Image (cartoon, rainbow, N blue to C red):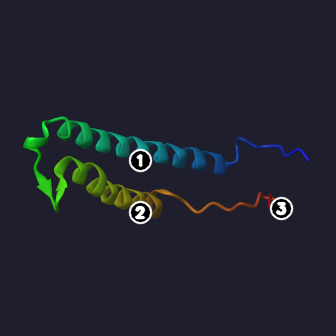
Amino acid sequence: MKYEVDQKDPRFKISHREAWIGIILVTINFIWWFGFAYGMGSKSVESYSYVWGLPAWFFYSCVAGFVVMVILVVFAVKFLFKEVPFEDEGGNSK
């Protein structure tokens, strides 16, 4: 059974926007992680500072980064994503 896709369907515009939001979130996560991990972690081990017993570069890149990303994703889902019906206009679900 072949299904014709209507590119004028407003759900495609919404899904493309939400996909871009996801790409932006992934990019923010990578920049955050890379910046702290390699920015602070490239020093000699003797010069490391520690947060809760973890090297600061690890704490900020992995632990704090995780918390920041959870907050950003929750914000995006609550305020930027929209509820979209899966049924087409004819009422048939695919």
Left or right: 68, with 57 as reference point: right
**Circle 1: residue type:** Leu
Left or right: 5, with 67 as reference point: right
Q: Looking at the image, tell me whether mark 3 or mark 1 is earlier in sequence order.
A: 1
Structural distance between the alpha carbons of marks 3 and 1:
33 Å
Q: x%, y% of residue 28?
A: 35, 44
Residue name at image x 10 percent, y 50 percent:
49
Q: Secondary structure at mark 2?
A: helix
Neighbor class of circle 3 (other Cα within 10 Å; few <14, some 14-19, many 20+) is few
Q: Looking at the image, tell me whether mark 2 or mark 1 is earlier in sequence order.
A: 1
Neighbor class of circle 1 (other Cα within 10 Å; few <14, some 14-19, many 20+) is some
Query: Of 15 and 25, which appears nearest the observer?
Result: 25
Q: Quadrant of residue 82?
A: bottom right
For discs 3 and 1, the disc positioned in front in the rendered view: 1
Q: x%, y% of residue 85?
A: 68, 62
Q: List the residue tagged with mark 3.
A: 92
Q: Secondary structure at mark 1?
A: helix
Q: List the residue tagged with mark 2.
A: 74
Residue name at image x 19 percent, y 35 percent:
42
